Image (cartoon, rainbow, N blue to C red):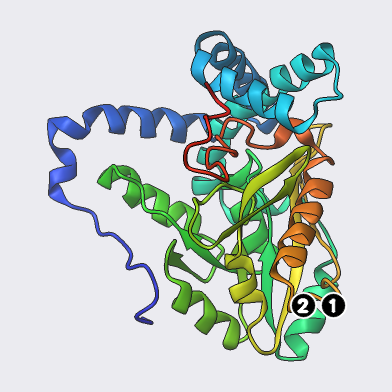
Amino acid sequence: MSKNKVPQPNFKLSFLLPKYWLTWVGVIILYSISWLPYKLQLALGRMIGKLFLKFGSSRKKIALKNLELCFPEMSDNEKQSILKRNFENTGIALLETGMGWWWPDWRVKRKINFIGLEHLDKAKQEGKGMLMLTMHYLSAEMNCRCIGIGNPMVVFYRPHNNPLMEFFQFRGRGRSNKYMLGKKDVKGLISALQAGESCIYLPDHDYGRKRSLFVPFFAVKDAATTTGTLIFARQKNTLTFMMIPTRNEDGSGYTVEITPALENFPTEDDEADVIRVNQELEKAILQKPEQYMWLHRRFKTRPNKEDPSLYK
């Protein structure tokens, strides 16, 4: 095993101790639900999401604030409509964890439609490293599995704090993909790109002040935006693509779109490049804004440390 790979966690007898019993109950329930008909799971997920909306006041406030910041021209009715559907999609996302972790390949394949895989095939034939930029859609667990079915990837990974959940999460996310790297393993991802691998990177969240520039993201003029994207995109023989995975509105499954490689990217202008990345992300998010992770405090880092929080 490469020294850069996250080692697979092993089952431990300590997982049977009482402190993990509640986790076991949750895992067993999630596993059992994952075998129900797909559209029934969607319906159950929407019901769970409506409960989240009713009782999750803090996350509701964050999501609504993000919508207000990003779309100041949008009417209150429009924002409330997106908010409602966003929480319904959050409930579905919970059940998609079980689908992504435990569905057999044949069941996943029946739910995927790929657009643009030929762009990756061409890059592979040319021996290119492939940097796949994507965003935090709520269907992330299922997206990870779907993408791996069509084109096994190397992915950045943050271990779960609960060791038992990490045991299941690692195996679930690793199914159909090549291997996982720790979320801060920059050298590991560079090595993978240089070896001609397809690598997922999500540049849409606020990763703090370090290696960030404050550039526009939707209507927010000074959003902390990672320049980490450019470290990878500038690797020799690497092409950068946008990958847009969404859940189909008709309940038929998922669509994974791969765009042609970004032309004239990156340049020598860091600010222009990260602005372009944000613009590409905006176009992708606007395809299905109700499926995006608005519950995250995207604008928590301010240009000046003394600036007041946008979330108070």
Task: Give coordinates of residue 135: x percent, y percent.
Answer: 67, 50
Identify which residue, 212 or 95, lies in the foreground: 212
Seen at 51% across and 84% down, the residue is: 191
Residue at position x 61%, y 64% in the image: 227
Front residue of this view, candidates 266 and 11? 266
Q: Is residue 48 left or right of residue 279?
A: left
Residue 40 appears anywhere in the view = no
Kindly identify which residue carries mark 2: 267
Q: Secondary structure at mark 1?
A: loop
**Residue pointed to by mark 1:** 264
At label 2, the amino acid type is Thr
- Image vertical order of residue 168 relative to residue 68, above or below: below
Q: Nearer the viewer, mark 1 or mark 2?
A: 2
| Quadrant assignment for the N terminus | bottom left
- Residue lying at 51% horizontally and 60% vertically, measured from the top left: 175
Q: Circle 2 sits in a helix, a strand or a loop, which is it?
A: loop
Q: Quadrant of residue 69?
A: top right
Q: Quadrant of residue 65?
A: top right
* Viewer-nearest residue: 230 or 152: 230
Left or right: residue 292 versus residue 94 is: right
Q: In this view of the protein, which residue sits in the foreground, 68 or 101?
A: 68
Q: Is residue 140 visible?
A: yes
Q: Do the residues bearing badges 1 and 2 touch, measured as CB atoms within 8 Å?
A: yes
Q: Local crowd at mark 1 within 10 Å, few (<14), some, or many (≥20)?
A: few
